[in-house]
């Protein structure tokens, strides 16, 4: 279904859509990484059983928490990117586009916090 836009060049609307889709791909990647983190210790156990060796895996339960945090972060990214897409679309249609970096700053802080948590987990798992 096509929509008629009163203001804003078609290229502007297409750029808004491409940006939205880029954020969707980013959120899927973050969620996928969270899934991998959750399943990593299970994978190590399965490999050790298949090879018939004893592999010591540091079990704190933190990988599950961090993985769930990353999946939640991906979900939040999807919601925020959709809201930003809708806001930009509305602004383009009204001819009143205002650039805002709040979304970028919020996602950056959340990903940075998740990265620090993952670094702490990995540091503790090694020692």
Image (cartoon, helix red, strand yellow):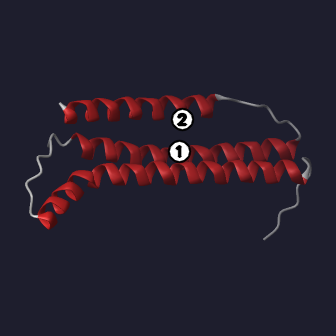
Q: Residue at x 73, y 52 (%)?
A: 18
The Cα–Cα distance between marks 1 and 2, rounded to whole angstroms, is 7 Å
Dot 2 corresponds to which residue? Answer: 107
In the rendered image, the quadrant that contains the N terminus is bottom right
Describe the element under mark 2 as helix, strand or loop.
helix
Q: Residue at x 57, y 43 (%)?
A: 80
Q: Position of residue 33 (x, y in %)?
A: 41, 50
Describe the element under mark 1 as helix, strand or loop.
helix
Q: Position of residue 63 (x, y in %)?
A: 26, 44
Q: Position of residue 89 (x, y in %)?
A: 77, 48
Is 79 or 21 nearer to us in this picture? 21
Q: Residue at x 58, y 54 (%)?
A: 25
Dot 1 corresponds to which residue? Answer: 77
Above or below, comparing residue 114 to residue 35 in the picture: above
Q: Position of residue 115 (x, y in %)?
A: 40, 33
Q: Quadrant of residue 99?
A: top right
Above or below, comparing residue 51 to residue 62 in the picture: below
Is 118 or 88 nearer to us in this picture? 118
Q: How many numbered marks, from 0 up?
A: 2
Q: Quadrant of residue 94?
A: top right
Q: Residue at x 19, y 61 (%)?
A: 47
Name the side, left or right, on which 66 lies relative to 85.
left
Name the side, left or right, on which 72 lies relative to 64.
right
Q: Residue furthest bottom?
A: 1
Is 53 or 59 nearer to us in this picture? 53
| Residues under numbered marks 1 and 2 in contact, where contact means CB atoms less than 8 Å apart | yes
């Amino acid at each position: 279904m096509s929509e008629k836009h009163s203001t804003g060049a078609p290229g502007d609307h297409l750029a808004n859509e491409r940006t939205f889709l880029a954020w969707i791909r980013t959120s899927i990647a973050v969620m996928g990484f969270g899934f991998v983190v959750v399943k990593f210790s299970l994978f190590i156990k399965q490999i050790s059983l298949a090879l018939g060796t004893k592999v010591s895996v540091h079990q704190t339960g933190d990988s599950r928490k961090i993985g769930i945090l990353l999946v939640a972060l991906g979900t939040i990214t999807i919601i925020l990117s959709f809201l930003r897409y809708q806001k930009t679309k509305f602004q383009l249609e009204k001819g009143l586009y205002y650039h805002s970096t709040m979304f970028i700053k919020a996602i950056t802080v959340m990903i940075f916090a998740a990265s620090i948590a993952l670094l702490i987990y990995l540091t503790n798992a090694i020692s």
